[in-house]
Image (tube, rainbow, N blue to C red):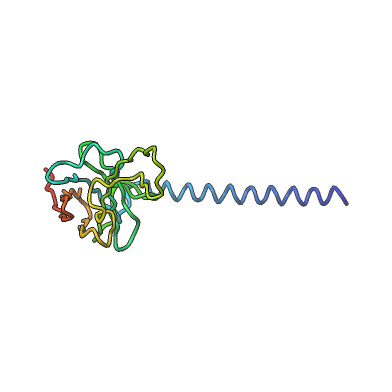
Amino acid sequence: MGRFKVRVIDRMINSNFRQIARLCLFCLSISLLTGCGRDASIAQVDGIVELDGAPLAKFDNAAVVFTPRAGRLATSVIDRNGRFQLQTNGIGEGAAIGEAKITVSATIERPKSSVSDERYDPVVWVIPRRFGDADRSGLSCKVVAGKLNSFKISLSSDGTGSVEILQKE
């Protein structure tokens, strides 16, 4: 009787293993047949961020975020030349097609002083803080399918900003 139980359990394990292996093979086949191409719901987006007419450059903590009405956020670090190229986490290069609110953040870390102060904030914004809030930034754009979308985001120290479409050659 003991051997019979062992054989039944052994068959069940082998059967489950085969089912899992078949499922994995099926999923792999489907992914290969559908291809690994770009997601049709996103389009390439790049651009430049300027502050007071000059590229927002030389900040280690600078980023752009596009928040679409529907879909996932697209983010990018702003490089040392003020340029960005958006990525959508889990999907790939680009941003969701359609209208998007834009936020920009650029901060530096303030060294901690030797004086203990409860109000000490180690982060200093180098642009007006409102640009870091999607509902208050006043920045928006439309990402168009099937082309490289290139934008110039112009910020001003007085808190005004605009987004301009750049034409690519």
Above or below, 102 relative to 81 = below
Q: Residue furthest front?
A: 115
For this view, does 136 lie left or right of residue 160?
right
What x and y, as percent, mark residue 115?
39, 40
For this view, does 116 lie left or right of residue 7?
left
What x and y, as percent, mark residue 144?
21, 56
What x and y, as percent, mark residue 137?
23, 58
What x and y, as percent, mark residue 11?
73, 49
Q: Residue at x 37, y 50 (%)?
A: 119
Q: Residue furthest right?
A: 1
Q: Nearer the viewer, residue 71 or 129?
A: 129
Q: Nearer the viewer, residue 18 or 152?
A: 152
Q: Nearer the viewer, residue 112 or 161?
A: 112
Q: Residue at x 25, y 61 (%)?
A: 136
Q: Residue at x 24, y 36 (%)?
A: 58
Count of numbered circles on the image: 0
Q: Nearer the viewer, residue 108 or 58?
A: 108
Q: Residue at x 82, y 51 (%)?
A: 5
Which quadrant is the C terminus positioned in? top left
